[in-house]
Image (tube, helix red, strand yellow):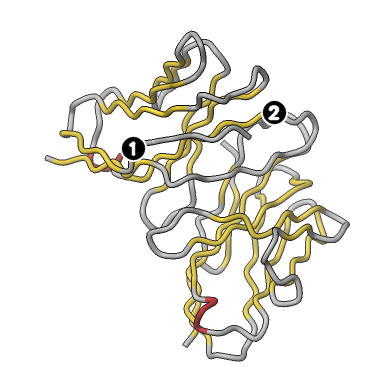
Amino acid sequence: DAKTTQPPSMDCAEGRAANLPCNHSTISGNEYVYWYRQIHSQGPQYIIHGLKNNETNEMASLIITEDRKSSTLILPHATLRDTAVYYCIVRAHNTGTASKLTFGTGTRLQVTL
Amino acid sequence: GAVVSQHPSWVICKSGTSVKIECRSLDFQATTMFWYRQFPKQSLMLMATSNEGSKATYEQGVEKDKFLINHASLTLSTLTVTSAHPEDSSFYICSASARQGFTEAFFGQGTRLTVV
């Protein structure tokens, strides 16, 4: 799996958009970009994933650059409950079986009043 | 999304005793489950891959005789920490994926183990 680089921490005011960047310059053509988050003392939670097109779901939007070497996770209206460590992970899909995840250090997002 | 349940959520045990942690997939069959360990202020580190009906695969540096993994059914994997010591105190997390259909991993809520 390709290596990812994320800033160690970010702050965001409640109600504002949180934009979390991730660099993955060595990503391969068959590798997807995944985002998970981990709220304190809980297991990680899946947020979103994409290959090359921008994606949006009820939690967030994922913007992937055209060269796929970086991406941004956008939480459109951050709340205090979004305070967590956000992990950007790059991996290929394995057909039929699960693939294990390699977690980096992630970005600690602190949402403040 | 699919639900993965871990039990117990936290446990305190004495040095030298063994502790069993259960990981269940509640609404799907998981042919593969993963066990992670997380020390305070650190990221998750994969310990082992648990495959239903076969032996687990351990990551380098993880003692298979100390961390016993059993995946006897498609909905249950267990991790037993044998002869626990204070340095085994950590947050243990499992994840599970279905044979087909799911492209994301689902995680349990984690188990906080404290060895005193």
**Residue depicted at x 36% and y 27%:** A21
Q: Callout 2: helix, strand or loop?
A: loop
Give the camera-side residue of B5 and A11.
Answer: A11
How far across and down, in percent of the image, does residue A95 sit?
Answer: 78, 28
Chain ID, mark 1? A
Residue at 56% from the left image edge and 53% from the top image edge = B108
- Dot 1: what SS? loop
**Where B15 sits versus B92, above or below?**
below
Return the x and y of residue A69 as percentages of the image width and height: 49, 19
Which amino acid type corresponds to the residue marked 2 in the rendered image?
A: His
State the mark number for residue A93.
Answer: 2
Image quadrant of residue A81?
top left
* Chain under callout 2: A
Q: Is residue B61 above or below residue B29?
A: below
Query: The disc labelled 1 sits on which kind of residue?
Result: Pro
Q: Is residue B112 left or right of residue B31?
A: left
Which residue is at the far left? A113
The residue pinned by badge 1 equals: A7
How far apart, in angstroms, are the residues tagged by discs 1 and 2?
26 Å
Q: Which mark is residue B114?
A: none
Report the number of numbered marks. Answer: 2
Residue A94: quadrant of the picture: top right
Q: Earlier in the sequence, mark 1 or mark 2?
A: 1
